[in-house]
Amino acid sequence: MVHRCLTVLLLAGIAVGQAAPAATPKPSGQSQSAGSNVPKQTAEVGPSTPVITIVGLCDKAAPGKTAAAKKPAGACKTVVTKAEFESLANALQPNMNAATKRMLADRYPKMLIFTEAAHKRGLDADPNFKKVLQFYRMQILTQELARSVKEKAEKVPETEIANYYKENAPEFEEADLQRVYVPKDKQTDTPAGDKPADVQKSEQESLKKEADDLRARAAAGETLDKLQKEAFDSAAVKGTPPQVGIGKLTRNELPMNHRPVLDLKAGEVSQVIADPNGFYFYKVISKDTKPLESVKSEIQNKLAQQKFQDEMQTIEQSAQTELNQAYFGTGPSMPGMPAGSMHPAPGPTRPSPPSMGAPAQSAPNPAGTNQNPSPESPKN
């Protein structure tokens, strides 16, 4: 992410103030896609082979180049070899793809030209430029530190992964579940928010009792498909009831207050769980534990992320900062920038499971067709 950001800044910066070229009509019957203008390499190019030549710009303009002897106007040129260009591309973004390399090749020469023009005007000697340059240097070093810590954190030993799996076995239990959802409010011509408080309370108490009765019948052996239909009938919902089978889920794939369901044995039915939008109960069809091989990458990412956060926090807390509140005030130090936003995460994190709450019920439309307030599936 760090290198991608740097590349975007590099590639986008040169476009400021330049007019976009007119669109070129494409021949009929042909389609274009991103990177379609990038030619396929048909021959191997050696490391010392020039890949960019800028006629009219002396070598001294390019970073790392020494001053060239004076030459007649137009005789100066700057040559960038494949090795030099690949080194730059890799520093900005490791494994840069061909399309991005072509964009870099288009913009890098212009940046060299503009840099030389700025130098001739003495802009690089301006005190403000030096302050900004120093700040960007610190920012880039911060990003490089985070990258280095990230790379180290990702090297999680196999023994640590195995130990985590063993010590957190309940986290990898999964159960094949069925679920019944009972809406919390009856669906009538009057939206729930517009009903008198006593009417709404009476409806909710009635539907809670219905949920308890249905749960007892499920524990006695009745099928949940039948009970789910009765739940919607009790709430006057005319839409199609949701499927009761929600597949195999782990503890982390359920909302926090639903996770005790995984403590049940196969064949058992949970107690009724109240949520803001309704009542739920589950039946466990079967249970097993995911094998280590299927969750190894998940554990590795989790441990790497924790190592990364711990190391960055240790570095950050190695010194203490005090702000003069009389000058800065007591507001947030960096509004809109959450903690840790200056460095990348050490790998993809598992997405949070969606809410189990059912969508808000709506009043019937003029045609008399009600929306189905079925709960969202908890599966990712």
Image: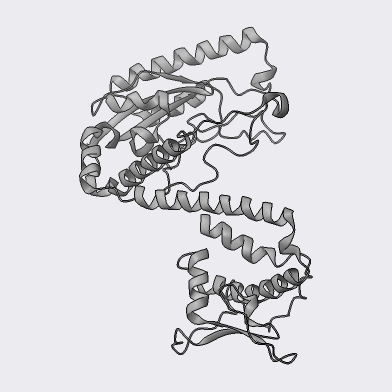
Numbered disc total: 0
Residue 33 appears in the figure = no
Which of the pair 312/44 is nearer the observer? 312
- Quarter holding the C terminus? top left
Tell whether 30 sits left or right of 173: right
x and y, in percent, of residue 330 in the image = 67, 24
Which of the pair 355/12 is nearer the observer? 12
Identity of the residue drawn at 50% across and 81% down? 82
Q: Is residue 78 above or below residue 214?
A: below
x and y, in percent, of residue 86 in the image = 49, 75
Q: Residue furthest top?
A: 198
Which of the pair 21/285 is nearer the observer? 21
Which of the pair 344/22 is nearer the observer? 344
Q: Is residue 182 above or below residue 26?
A: above
Identity of the residue drawn at 72% across and 72% down? 114
Tell whether 164 sits left or right of 68: left
Identify the image's colour scheme: rainbow, by chain, secondary structure or one colour.
one colour
Tell whether 175 sits left or right of 123: left
Q: Is residue 20 above or below residue 329?
A: below
Q: Is residue 17 above or below residue 128?
A: below
Tell whether 63 sits left or right of 170: right
The image quadrant that residue 5 belongs to is bottom right
Residue 156 appears in the figure = yes
x and y, in percent, of residue 145 in the image = 46, 50
The image quadrant that residue 228 belongs to is top left
